[in-house]
Image (cartoon, rainbow, N blue to C red):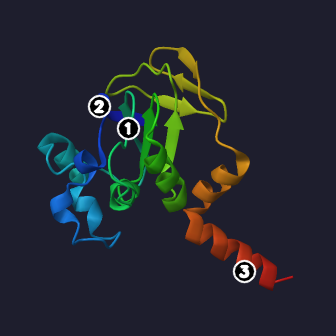
Amino acid sequence: MKVIYKLGSDISTDHIYPGRYMATVLPTETPQYAFADMPDLNNLLNSGDKTQPRVIVADNNFGTGSSREQAVSTLVGHNLVIVARNFARIFFQNSINLGLKTVECPEIEAEVGDELEIGDDYLLNISTGKKYKIVPVPAARRAIVEAGGLIAYTRKLLIAEQSR
């Protein structure tokens, strides 16, 4: 996966999804407003190929601020993987519930254009050859993200139960 953008620390949910767009809540409509106050990133996201996962790398406390779910759904709509040194607690839980792949990598070093490989307990920056430990996600949470979020995961469990 390729790093398409690098952010600093304390990126708030208002940076990710500005409050003035809160009337727009449909997951099909929110992605166009991702990082609306950062025109270069917004344009990159809205004009890029969403068929392959793309990576945004950030420093500390990504997703700080309010608990708005739209900050996560807007990123899901762009097929992003967020790699950060750490995440704000509520944002991290919302990312699991909505199926956004987040990777906590406390010592990450990556630049725009770097290719990354993400394993269960490591992140390899293929471009630099450096390997980093990541904070592993418990299997139950990983299963929810891989299913596409809590609703999709629950639906999958209910269907499996009904077919027994």
- Label 1 sits on a secondary structure element that is loop
Does the residue at mark 2 contact the one at mark 1 (Cβ under 8 Å)?
yes
Q: Nearer the viewer, residue 130 or 21?
A: 21
Give the distance between the C-alpha atoms of the residues marked 3 and 1, in whole angstroms: 35 Å
> Residue flagged by tag 1: what amino acid is it?
Phe
Quadrant assignment for the C terminus: bottom right
Counting from the top left corner in percent of width and height, residue 120 is at 66, 36
Q: Residues within 10 Å of mark 1 (few under 14, many from 20)?
A: many
> Residue flagged by tag 3: what amino acid is it?
Ile
| Rendered residue at 50%/23% (across/down) | 106
Q: Residue furthest right?
A: 164
Q: Residue furthest bottom?
A: 162
Q: Nearer the viewer, residue 19 or 29?
A: 19
Counting from the top left corner in percent of width and height, residue 81 is at 45, 44
> Residue flagged by tag 2: what amino acid is it?
Leu
Counting from the top left corner in percent of width and height, residue 56 is at 36, 37
Name the residue that disc number 3 marks: 159
Does the residue at mark 2 contact the one at mark 3 (Cβ under 8 Å)?
no
- Label 3 sits on a secondary structure element that is helix
